[in-house]
Amino acid sequence: MTLTLGRGPFGPGGGEFSSGPPPENWWYVEDWPRRMRAVLAGRTVLDSRRGKVLYRRGEPPRHWFPLADVHTDLLVPADDGRTGEGPDRWSVVVGDHTAPEAVTGPPGKQSDAPALQDHVTIDFAAMDRWFEEDEPLYAGPRDPYHRVDVRAASHHVLVRHKDIPLAETRRPKLLFETGLPVRYYLPFADVDLGLLERSGTVSECPYKGDGQHWHLVAGGGRIPDAAWSLPHPLPEALPAAEHICFYGEKVHVEVDGERIR
């Protein structure tokens, strides 16, 4: 996804540059002017308007913040047996709550991004809540270079498992997401829902929302998490509500007679 993953311009599946492929150690840093706050056990760990975003080839973007914008009284050096090499790590301790090694940095001399000196990065999942300005963040910070577009289409989409038809439609919704293959979402009405069983797997995406997964039970067998739907889509993915998308690597999916994976 985004600039550096999947089919993004600096990802492994990206397009072509006039100067040839970018070097493996490619990186890019830009300012992040939005106010960011991280909260653990009711205490503000970070409050910053001076963040930066680091993009490295093959890695997701990572936000870095001045150490001065972190409540350092909540940080405890992590004893991880290191010998002084690599960046420092701290755990965040608020009363009885501890987020082990949740804070990393500054990058140190091994970093070729000098703009990040005296900055740290915080594990998003280790905090209870994050806010961008005054709005809560879901699943992770949203990358301005990443977008989702859903378009109505008239492709003939056929889904089957072995010889068992699962779905067929000529009114799919095509979801285009930065750096990812096109996803074909099929209306519930055109899917044999009797062959699907709700899964306990619910993925999180800051661009689409929850991904409710479904097991396929057909032909005497069971394929775990063969498809997913968006029960509570975020605004960009709202047109894909009440639709299901199948994993092409788990079942047979054809679009206009051509199999996709």
Image (cartoon, rainbow, N blue to C red):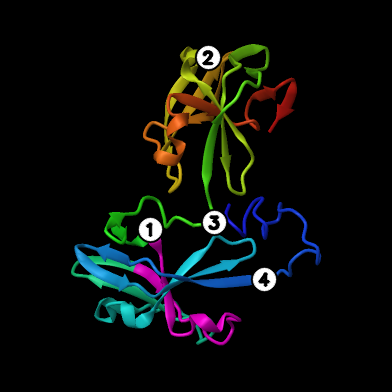
- Secondary structure under the numbered disc 1 in the rendered image: helix
- Report the Cα–Cα distance between label 4 and label 2: 45 Å
Give the amino acid at mark 3: Tyr
Asked whether disc 3 touches disc 4, contact meaning CB atoms under 8 Å apart, the reply is no
Q: Is residue 119 above or below residue 139?
A: below
Asked whether disc 4 touches disc 2, contact meaning CB atoms under 8 Å apart, the reply is no
Give the labeled residue for mark 3.
145
Which of the 4 image quadrants contains residue 251? top right
Give the labeled residue for mark 4.
26
Give the amino acid at mark 2: Asp
Is residue 217 in the magenta section? no
Circle 3: is it few (<14), some (14-19), or many (20+) Cα within 10 Å? few
Residue drawn at point x = 61 percent, y = 58 percent: 3
Residue drawn at point x = 50 percent, y = 26 percent: 244
- Report the Cα–Cα distance between label 1 and label 2: 37 Å
Residue 125 badge: 1
Give the labeled residue for mark 2.
190
Quick one: 243 or 165, which is closer to the camera? 243
- Secondary structure under the numbered disc 3 in the rendered image: loop
Whole-percent x, y for residue 202 in the image: 42, 38
In the image, the segment drawn in magenta is 100-125
- Report the Cα–Cα distance between label 3 and label 4: 17 Å
Classify residue 205 as left or right of residue 219: left
Residue 158 badge: none
* Mark 1 or mark 2, earlier in chain: 1
Circle 1: is it few (<14), some (14-19), or many (20+) Cα within 10 Å? few
Circle 2: is it few (<14), some (14-19), or many (20+) Cα within 10 Å? some
- Secondary structure under the numbered disc 4 in the rendered image: loop
Give the amino acid at mark 4: Trp
